[in-house]
Amino acid sequence: MKGVLILSKGIMVFVEQSQGNIRKTSLELLSQASVIAGQAGEAVTAVILGQNIENLADEAIQYGADKVIVADAPQLEKYTIGPYTRVLKSIIRQEEPQAVLLGNTATGRELAPRLAQRLGVGQASDCTGLEYAADTFLRFKRPVYAGKALVYVSSKVRPVVATIRPNTFQAVARVPQQQAVVVKYPVESEAAELSVIIREVVLAGSKRPELTEANIIIAGGRGLKGPEHFAMLGEFADTVGGAVAASRVAVDAGWVEHEYQVGQTGKTVSPTLYIACGISGAIQHLAGMGSARCVVAINNDPEANIFKIADYGIVGDVFEVVPMLTQQLRKTAY
Ligand code: FAD
């Protein structure tokens, strides 16, 4: 069945939850969706899937939802692609929103294309901007060619499916709408049928924020000279409540795991502050962090490429500068 033309209404946000907590990226989407819905005179519908998650509806309303649809079923307790796609698709068909927004997370990246294919519509991936447009309702901004260029995408086919990069918008709590409604969606057993059973979820031991959602990232490259010096970055990150990341050279050398890699073949991050330590600024690295709001580079080569894109540059030895910064920031009770 093809996408429906224009009869559709509102913006739907898929609210990701993990272990009973809404992910920050979903709150960011709800906030921005509510701004746009306000401009367009439309409503925001949040959709939450899981088990025993009805209590999350209040938070979704606080961050911008006018209506919350809760699909609560034992089979939806842990995310699996089959049931989540089927249940979401039938909710979208029932609600007929103009747009369906998902975070550009591992889950969002897996779900969005499947949904778009089953709805017979196109999809905009990894968007770094989203605004109201009078003619097409929404206009998405997305980087292409490893961040070298930006394209603006819009569509008149409904619904538009899009994933938005975490940290693109701020999550802003508002006075909850008195008339906001919470609706239970009756999950059909056929839709929720599991072909994969997840026996156990083992969480990574780190207390640091997840890289793609971190507000502050301290990244290290070849300039760190060895795995032992990543502990120095860890201390720096813990002082400012940030996450640690790495260039591919540091990962390929086995200094840190691949999950830390930022760049074309690693993760795409969008923090408020990115501090690059001993990283030259190769195009493939910039592809993963180019949308950081503020970049600070620490490098002993004044000609390093990273200084061309940095907002602040410190020409110096990482082994002197990083401990000094950590010490100073500790004093200021960050
Ligand atoms: P280098 O380029 O060697 O830079 C090290 C920097 O440290 C230098 O600028 C040096 O001046 C500085 N330095 C040295 N000692 C000190 C010191 N004591 N104090 C301060 N500064 C110091 N790279 C990624 O990062 N992510 C990717 O996803 C990625 N994907 C790729 C995909 C492809 C297909 C290809 C071909 C490459 C990819 N790369 C990626 C690799 C990329 O091209 C670069 O090789 C890599 O980013 C360089 O890492 P680096 O900056 O740590 O090392």
Image (cartoon, rainbow, N blue to C red):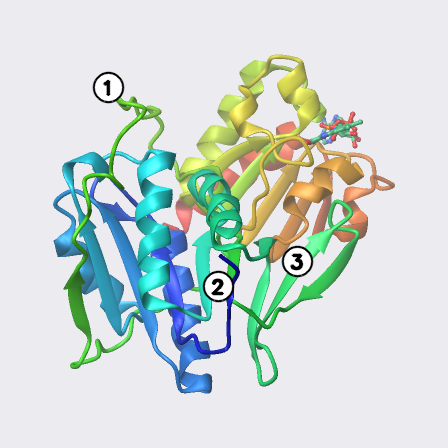
**Residue 235: quarter of image:** top left
| Alpha carbon separation for disc pair 2 and 1 | 35 Å
Instruction: Find residue 7 and report its horizontal and vertical position in percent.
Output: 45, 78
Q: Earlier in the sequence, mark 3 or mark 1?
A: 3
Q: Is mark 3 on a helix, strand or loop?
A: strand
Mark 1 is surrounded, within 10 Å at the Cα level, by few (under 14), some (14 to 19) or many (20 or more) other residues, namely few
Q: Which of marks 2 and 1 is nearer the N terminus?
A: 2
Give the residue furthest to the front: 1
| Alpha carbon separation for disc pair 3 and 1 | 37 Å
| Alpha carbon separation for disc pair 3 and 2 | 14 Å
Q: Mark 2 points at which residue?
A: 169
- Residue 15 in sight: no
**Residue 247: quarter of image:** top right
Q: Is mark 1 on a helix, strand or loop?
A: loop
Q: Name the residue under label 1.
A: 199
Relative to 74, is 221 on the left or the right?
right
Mark 3 is surrounded, within 10 Å at the Cα level, by few (under 14), some (14 to 19) or many (20 or more) other residues, namely some
Q: Name the residue under label 3.
A: 142
Of badges 3 and 2, nearer the viewer stands 3
Between 202 and 182, the one nearer to me in the picture: 182
Instruction: Find residue 296 and report its horizontal and vertical position in percent.
Output: 65, 48
